[in-house]
Image (tube, rainbow, N blue to C red):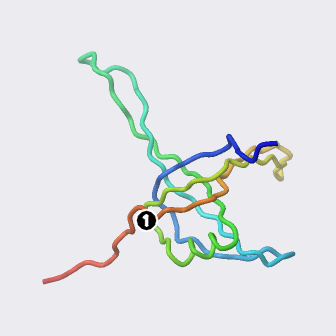
Amino acid sequence: MSRFSFNQCIVEGNVAATPEIRHTRDSSRPVSNFTIYVDSSYKSKKNQDGGVVFKKRTERIPVTVWAKLAEFTCKNVNKGDKVRVVGKIRTRSYENKEGHVVNSFEIVADQINIMQQKRDEYYED
């Protein structure tokens, strides 16, 4: 059996809120969940001149990081930072309170690269 996985994705976007670390109950293993906003575009209808119109859509992508990567992320990543996430897609199904089956997904990160940190400071003369 090969250790190579075809389930690999790379997304780049801005962190929605500063990640916070928590620990699992049974093993007290560090974990963090956060969301990144990823912009994508798509072709819309043709405009009156016959040209193609591109529209922007922002996707909300849930990310989970474990162990040392969770600790690194919580120490170094803040709301608004642009990050590149390399990881695997994991899906889940569960039944909500109304009895409907809900399907969800998340990226379980293997790697987080900080592409650009948001600057909150401003300068006055």
Q: How many marks?
A: 1
Residue shown at 48% from the left, 52% from the top? 12
- Tell which residue pokes out farthest to the top in this image: 50
- Tell which residue pokes out farthest to the bottom in this image: 125
Residue shown at 68% from the left, 43% from the top? 7
Residue pointed to by mark 1: 80
Left or right: 43, with 50 as reference point: right
At mark 1, the secondary structure is: loop
Left or right: 61, with 6 as reference point: left
Give the quadrant of the C terminus.
Answer: bottom left
- Percent from the top left, x then y, of residue 120? 34, 75
Give the quadrant of the N terminus.
Answer: top right
- Percent from the top left, x then y, of residue 122? 25, 78
The correct choice, above or below, for 105 with respect to 32 in the image is above
Residue shown at 34% from the left, 72% from the top? 119
Closer-to-camera residue (61/75)? 75
As shown in the figure, which amino acid type bears the numbered disc 1?
Gly
**Quadrant position of residue 121:** bottom left
Check disc 1: other Cα within 10 Å, few if <14, some if 14-19, many if 20+: some
Left or right: 86, with 106 as reference point: left
- Percent from the top left, x then y, of residue 55? 38, 35
Left or right: 95, with 18 as reference point: right
Residue shown at 49% from the left, 56% from the top? 84
The correct choice, above or below, for 25 with respect to 116 in the image is below
- Tell which residue pokes out farthest to the left in this image: 125
**Quadrant position of residue 102:** top right
**Quadrant position of residue 68:** bottom right
